[in-house]
Image (spheres, helix red, strand yellow):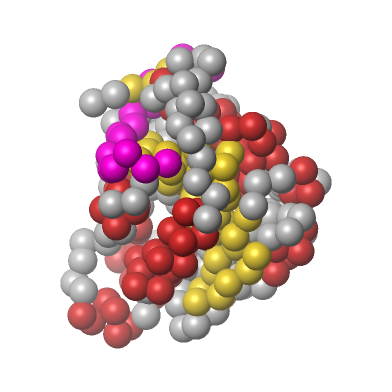
């Protein structure tokens, strides 16, 4: 079980699987471990050397109760993982909060990024489109099981959940302590990469479900319009977890985009 060390000494668990294909870093959503990708990772591993990580506060990584949780901080953690794995340059596919983290990676470290995919994500406040107040109230209700049902409905269509009883790793890492959940929430809410987005030089694909109310679909054209040369694709009928429920469409779309610009794995100068 490999661990990288973040700049502040936090131990970060990660895994590497797949072919001898180009490296692909997969970044999960808020309050989720690497298991966020369980349903589709094998499909990517058939074409790429996939790297997944547990954010600080999740999975097998350390869970410090400090002010070290932020989307730029998660990006620094991801770089530490790539360094430890000996990967100098990789494609990056980030969804939800992982897409926010990926924005900082691509804007701040263009030499480390091959191609970039931003899924069901946002540029952050104040320029992004926030979820509606009715959604926020429903998720914050004191009845935990009712809030879970609301989240499930935001992630997947009723037809999908009727046919797939779960479990659903995308609903959050159940092992997270309360302090880590709070800090993840604050980190994602504080994200604002608007001024950094024009600095992204990697070929970029923005993907979103047309029926996403958790992270409103209106954020997709905002990102695509702010990042030079970015392409935009919407998945009809998809909600927040488009990458899982609509994998038959989304995975080939992303994989083909990434393979158009293969990167050669090079040893990191920091490994």
The vertical placement of 240 against 192, above or below, is below
Can you see residue 33?
no
- Residue 111 image offset from top left, x and y in percent: 64, 32
Q: Which residues are magenta?
A: 7-22
Who is closer to the viewer here, 49 or 83? 49
Point 29% across, 79% down: residue: 160
Q: Where on the picture, by quarter, is residue 208?
A: bottom right
Point 21% across, 74% down: residue: 164
Does residue 70 appear to the left or right of 43 in the view shown? right
Who is closer to the viewer here, 10 or 197? 197
Point 39% across, 25% down: residue: 85
The vertical placement of 203 against 18, above or below, is below
Point 55% across, 66% down: residue: 207
- Residue 106 image offset from top left, x and y in percent: 64, 41
- Residue 210 image offset from top left, x and y in percent: 54, 79
Q: Is residue 50 magenta?
A: no
The vertical placement of 156 against 117, above or below, is below
Q: Where on the picture, by quarter, is residue 162?
A: bottom left
* Numbered label tally: 0
The vertical placement of 256 against 158, above or below, is above
Can you see residue 20?
yes
Does residue 218 appear to the left or right of 11 in the view shown? right
Q: Is residue 19 magenta?
A: yes
Does residue 120 appear to the left or right of 26 in the view shown? right
> What quarter of the picture does the C terminus occupy?
top left
Who is closer to the viewer here, 148 or 264? 264
Who is closer to the viewer here, 200 or 165? 200
- Residue 197 image offset from top left, x and y in percent: 74, 48
> What quarter of the picture does the N terminus occupy?
top left
């Amino acid at each position: 079980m490999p661990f990288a060390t973040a700049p502040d000494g936090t131990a970060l668990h990660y895994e590497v699987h797949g072919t001898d294909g180009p490296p692909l870093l997969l970044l999960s959503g808020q309050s989720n471990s690497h298991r966020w990708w369980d349903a589709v990772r094998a499909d990517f591993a058939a074409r790429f050397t996939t790297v997944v990580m547990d954010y600080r506060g999740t999975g097998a990584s350390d869970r410090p109760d400090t002010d070290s949780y932020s989307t730029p901080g998660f990006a620094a953690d991801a770089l530490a993982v790539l360094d430890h794995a000996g990967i100098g340059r990789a494609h990056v596919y980030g969804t939800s909060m992982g897409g926010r983290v990926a924005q900082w990676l691509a804007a701040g470290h263009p030499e480390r990024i091959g191609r970039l995919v931003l899924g069901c994500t946002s540029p952050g406040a104040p320029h992004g489109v926030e979820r509606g107040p009715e959604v926020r109230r429903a998720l914050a209700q004191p009845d935990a099981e009712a809030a879970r049902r609301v989240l499930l409905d935001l992630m997947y269509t009723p037809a999908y959940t009727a046919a797939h009883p779960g479990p659903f790793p995308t609903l959050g890492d159940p092992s997270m302590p309360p302090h880590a959940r709070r800090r993840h929430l604050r980190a994602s809410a504080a994200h604002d990469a608007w001024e950094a987005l024009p600095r992204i030089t990697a070929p970029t694909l923005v993907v979103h479900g047309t029926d996403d109310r958790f992270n409103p679909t209106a954020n997709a054209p905002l990102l695509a319009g702010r990042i030079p040369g970015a392409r935009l694709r919407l998945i009809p009928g998809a909600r927040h977890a488009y990458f899982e429920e609509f994998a038959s469409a989304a995975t080939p779309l992303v994989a083909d985009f990434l393979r158009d610009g293969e990167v050669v794995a090079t040893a990191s100068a920091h490994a």
